[in-house]
Image: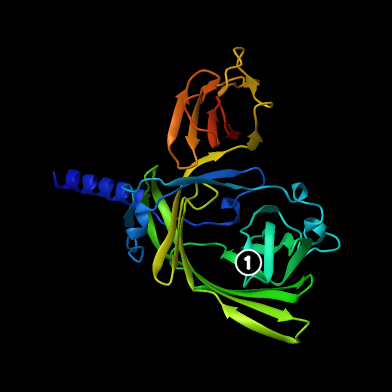
């Protein structure tokens, strides 16, 4: 009997260990061009205490409700505007800045003097780190390709619980038409501060690590006309991200500014492609009823779910027809499940 109990205890401990195992994130766990990640934001989760962490920890955020859907699209460098690619798409003339993929970046306005819009950030993956090589954007309306003088390292590899804190610095300086120059100094401190299971409103991930990034940024503006410059310190940010070996993106991400959570979002779907389609690109139903769309060329179609930009499901269909007649005009995400893949389309009604 004692031997049987010992075997049972060993079995239970094995189950516990397997369900709370430490994992390692490496370069093979990063995204690649063509990946689309759909996230749901949650304002409910902003009241949580995200300082809580530990070994074999259980983070339970299942009570959060969604407030808005957004998507993260990973694209090839060659699909971005040609003027942006100058520094990032030639491994012979710019080997240090040759990039693996790009993604849309945030617009930036600095004191009403520098406007950075229509931005793409360029990323490189190697065995040691995921790096931002630079960006392409319109700076005060003029297209520019800006490489980082000091390349910014987002994550060191491998990442696992107990790794040493990683510090990195990034820096760039860009010419600003009709002004002078604008630059940014970026300092990151990256550490894995816990591992365990994570439950979001959408899914449970039994094996995750949590990566904590402390981000400091300083903007620099130099005005040629007046011959002087100034610096502006941005608020310190703490970013918490949960990674698994089964997805190629953080399954949850929280941003804290000035000790106050300002952004919390969790992964909803990963899809194999995304397109923007309008009435002409979808075959309208034979009745030509406004708001009814028929999907074509989808062999192996199983079902489709449609969400509005607030993350609310507005319809679920097992036939290849989408009926939005009762829905207001606007933008919707349609997630189409095939036999062996999923696709996401953005529908503009």
**Residue drawn at (77%, 62%) of the image:** 145
Query: In what quadrant of the picture does the C terminus appear?
Result: top right
Instruction: Say which quarter of the image contains residue 288.
Output: top right
- Res 122 visible: no
Q: Residue furthest right?
A: 93
Q: Is residue 69 left or right of residue 114?
A: left
Q: Nearer the viewer, residue 108 or 164?
A: 108
Q: Which residue is mark 1?
A: 109
Instruction: Say which quarter of the image contains residue 294.
Output: top right
**Residue drawn at (81%, 56%) of the image:** 83
**Residue drawn at (45%, 42%) of the image:** 310
Query: In what quadrant of the picture does the N terminus appear?
Result: top left
Label 1 element class: strand
Q: Is residue 81 left or right of residue 28?
A: right
Residue 39 vs 279, above or below: the answer is below
Residue 291, how many percent across, how many down? 55, 24
Residue 180 vs 256, above or below: the answer is below
Residue 216, how many percent across, how many down? 54, 75
Q: Residue furthest bottom?
A: 227
Instruction: Say which quarter of the image contains residue 344.
Output: top right
Q: Nearer the viewer, residue 199 or 171?
A: 171
Mark 1 closeness class: few <14, some 14–19, many ≥20 residues within 10 Å: few
Q: Nearer the viewer, residue 126 or 71?
A: 71
């Amino acid at each position: 009997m004692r031997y049987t109990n010992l075997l049972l205890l060993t079995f239970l401990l094995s189950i516990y260990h397997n369900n709370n195992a430490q994992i390692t994130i490496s370069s093979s766990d990063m995204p690649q061009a063509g990946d689309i990640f759909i996230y749901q934001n949650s304002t409910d989760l902003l009241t949580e205490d995200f300082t809580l962490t530990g070994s074999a920890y259980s983070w339970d955020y299942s009570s959060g409700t969604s407030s808005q859907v957004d998507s993260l699209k990973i694209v090839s460098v060659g699909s971005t505007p040609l003027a942006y690619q100058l520094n990032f798409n030639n491994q012979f003339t710019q080997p240090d800045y040759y990039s693996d993929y790009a993604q849309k970046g945030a617009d930036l306005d600095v004191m009403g003097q520098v406007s950075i819009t229509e931005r793409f950030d360029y990323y490189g993956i190697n065995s040691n780190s995921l790096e931002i090589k630079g960006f392409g954007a319109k700076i005060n309306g003029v297209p520019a390709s800006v490489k980082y003088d000091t390349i910014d390292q987002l994550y060191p590899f491998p990442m696992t619980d107990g790794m040493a804190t990683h510090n990195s610095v990034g820096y760039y300086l860009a010419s600003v038409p009709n002004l002078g120059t604008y630059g940014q100094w970026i300092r990151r401190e990256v550490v894995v501060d816990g591992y365990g299971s994570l439950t979001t409103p959408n899914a449970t991930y039994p094996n995750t690590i949590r990566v904590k990034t402390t981000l400091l940024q300083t903007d620099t503006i130099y005005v040629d006309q007046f011959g002087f410059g100034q610096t502006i310190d941005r608020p310190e940010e703490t970013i918490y991200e949960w990674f698994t070996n089964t997805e190629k993106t953080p399954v949850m991400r929280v941003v804290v500014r000035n000790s106050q959570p300002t952004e919390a979002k969790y992964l909803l779907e990963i899809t194999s492609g995304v397109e923007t389609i309008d009435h002409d690109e979808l075959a309208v139903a034979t009745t030509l009823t406004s708001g009814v769309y028929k999907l074509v060329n989808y062999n192996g179609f199983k079902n489709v779910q449609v969400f509005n930009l607030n993350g609310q499901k507005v319809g679920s269909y097992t036939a290849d027809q989408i009926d939005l007649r009762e829905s207001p005009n606007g933008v919707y995400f349609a997630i189409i499940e095939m036999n062996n893949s999923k696709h996401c389309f953005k529908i503009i009604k």
